[in-house]
Image (cartoon, helix red, strand yellow):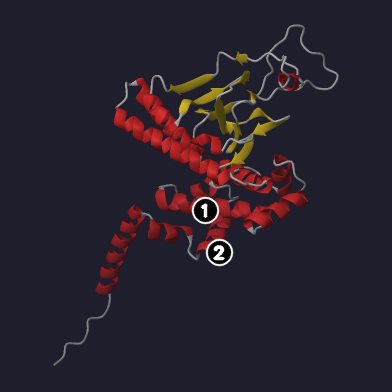
Amino acid sequence: MFDMAEPVLMMSETANPEVIDVSPDCREQICCDSLLPALVQEQVWLAGCSCLRTYYRIERYFEDVHCFLLTLGGEGEVWIGDRLERLQVGEWALIPAGQPLCYQLPETLLPEGQSPAPEPQPAASGDWDLVWLLLHKDSPWDAFASHPRLGCTSQQGTLLRTIENLYAEQERHQDPLLSALLVEQLGFYLRRLLQKGEGQSRGERQALRLELMLKESLTGCWDIGRMADALHLSERQLYRLCQQHFALAPMALLQRLRLQRAALLLASGGDSVKQVAQLCGFKNEYHFSTAFKRQQGLAPSHYRNLHHPAFKAGSARRGGTESIESAAHRPDREIAK
């Protein structure tokens, strides 16, 4: 196993300039400008998505290439300057050309007092799913890469889908026009992401990280302590963060996100109200219905009848039938003589 201090040595001129230690169960899809010439128009050398498992460690040095990493799931570690940063879901790093490029799956530390195995073994660790791009220096990307940067975004899915589509085009001997459109889309998404990240404060990154974390696990047993621990904050710091960025208390933020998801499910899906309550993390249907009506002014079933085309049509048919039936039971009007 590599010593955690080793990346510090990597910063010296005498360090080994390239370490590639990849587990056989890691999987990658890679687009290359030599196979997909459309990438040249956006000054992209390589673009890919990776599913990293068991162990993975890269130490490289590119004089003429910037590196962008964005976490889709799990978490990984990357050296930024002289410190090791963890990238969790939605978090990204941009390492400029000419800077050491060191990133890895988090290593598992041995419990205190436990001796290491006689033979070096890769550490058991979690998974890390990410998208990444290697961008040419002396191009418009230089404007974003004057120094190492960290940021957070909720748009990781758009980059992933675009790279997956590009990979499919590369594998099936692409339609040049479609490839060019996809590469243009990739460049647009990445520029927008980096522009939004300009000047993003640590507090803004933490707030977005909290929102992404809660959305990923709305059914989780969340409380203020668990949220604070996940962000490495005290409960008081968490409360201040939520007030500053959401104007809500932490549990009120969770409630709002659950109700937003519920509104989407009611307007687009066929699950029962009880199932929607469960999918969004509510204790029971009663608690869900009460909270939903308080926010929307409508019971969940009425909201669905108003916004879901299938239920709207059914409601209209039932309403029409009921109107006819009620009219049939009304006394006939007196005939004018």
Q: Which residue is mark 1?
A: 260
Residue at point 50%, 63% (across, down): 296
The x and y percentages for residue 226 are 71, 43
The x and y percentages for residue 21 are 62, 14
- Who is closer to the viewer here, 116 or 139? 139
Disc 1 crowd rating (10 Å Cα; few below 14, some 14-19, many 20+) is few
Residue 154 in view, yes or no: no
Q: Is residue 295 left or right of residue 121?
A: left
Identify the mark at residue 229; answer none if there is no mark.
none
Classify mark 1: helix, strand or loop.
Answer: helix
Q: Which residue is mark 2?
A: 294
Residue at point 54%, 47% (across, down): 280
Q: Give above or below for 64 relative to 271.
A: above
Q: Which residue extends farthest left?
A: 337
Q: Which residue extends farthest top?
A: 119
Q: Is residue 71 left or right of residue 172?
A: right
Classify mark 2: helix, strand or loop.
Answer: helix
Q: Amino acid at mark 1?
A: Gln
Is the C terminus in the top left, top right, bottom left or bottom right quadrant? Answer: bottom left
Q: Amino acid at mark 2?
A: Arg
Residue at point 43%, 32% (across, down): 42
Q: Is residue 106 left or right of residue 92?
A: right
- Earlier residue among tags 1 and 2: 1
Residue 336 in view, yes or no: yes
- Residue 24 falls in image quadrant: top right
Mark toward the viewer: 1 or 2: 1
Q: Give above or below for 6 relative to 205.
A: above
Q: Which residue extends farthest front?
A: 138
Q: Which residue extends farthest right?
A: 113
The x and y percentages for residue 92 are 59, 36
